[in-house]
Image: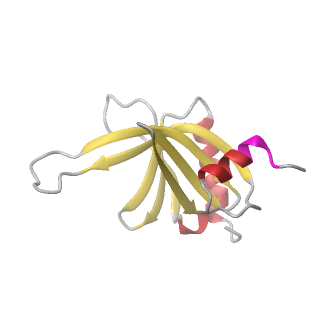
Amino acid sequence: PPPSRACSELHALFPGLDKNENLIEQFPCKLLQTYSCAHNQHTPDIQMAFQGTLFITDRHTCFNVEENERRLPIVLPHKSVTRVERHRPTRRSEKNDVLKMSLAENEWISMKDFASGHLDSALALLEHLCESPEA
């Protein structure tokens, strides 16, 4: 059968993926980044969120940010993810939980602002794929 429109979009956004890789699910959400001042320790860290789409395939977690006509594609093999977990917000102003994928000590990627029920679905799927021996 011909690849679905979503699979075609996936391979167009992430050309390095194997053509046989299967898209399992995709979720609109935001990539959460923390930026620190490089030239002093007095300026507080700033958190920024970038709208995009989380794509989960049978072998990779991918995220595509499109902002100001620039693309930022992120591709993580499931085998590089050491832990997947839900984090509760630390600030009172934050209402939504965060999906955190740990990659190494002090290295992680976080996503937030999923549609209702999507965080639970993404979390369960990633826990299964990242912890399975085939990943």
Residue 16 located within the stretch drawn in magenta: no
Magenta region: which residues? 3-7
113 or 86, which is in the foreground? 113
Residue 16 vs 118, above or below: the answer is below
Q: Position of residue 11 (x, y in %)?
A: 67, 53
| Quadrant showing the C terminus | bottom right
Is residue 35 visible in the rendered image? The answer is yes
Extreme residue toward the right, this view: 1
Q: Position of residue 40 (x, y in %)?
A: 10, 54
Q: Position of residue 42 (x, y in %)?
A: 9, 49
Q: Mostly what secondary structure, the magenta segment?
A: helix
Q: Which residue sits at x=42%, y=58%? A: 108
Is residue 89 visible in the rendered image? The answer is no
Extreme residue toward the front, this view: 69
Q: Which residue sits at x=71%, y=70%? A: 134
Q: Position of residue 27 (x, y in %)?
A: 61, 39
88 or 52, which is in the foreground? 52
For this view, does 81 lie left or right of residue 106? right
State the colouring used for the structure image. Answer: secondary structure
Residue 47 vs 81, above or below: the answer is above
Q: Which residue sits at x=12%, y=56%? A: 39
For this view, does 46 lie left or right of residue 7? left
Residue 19: quadrant of the picture? bottom right
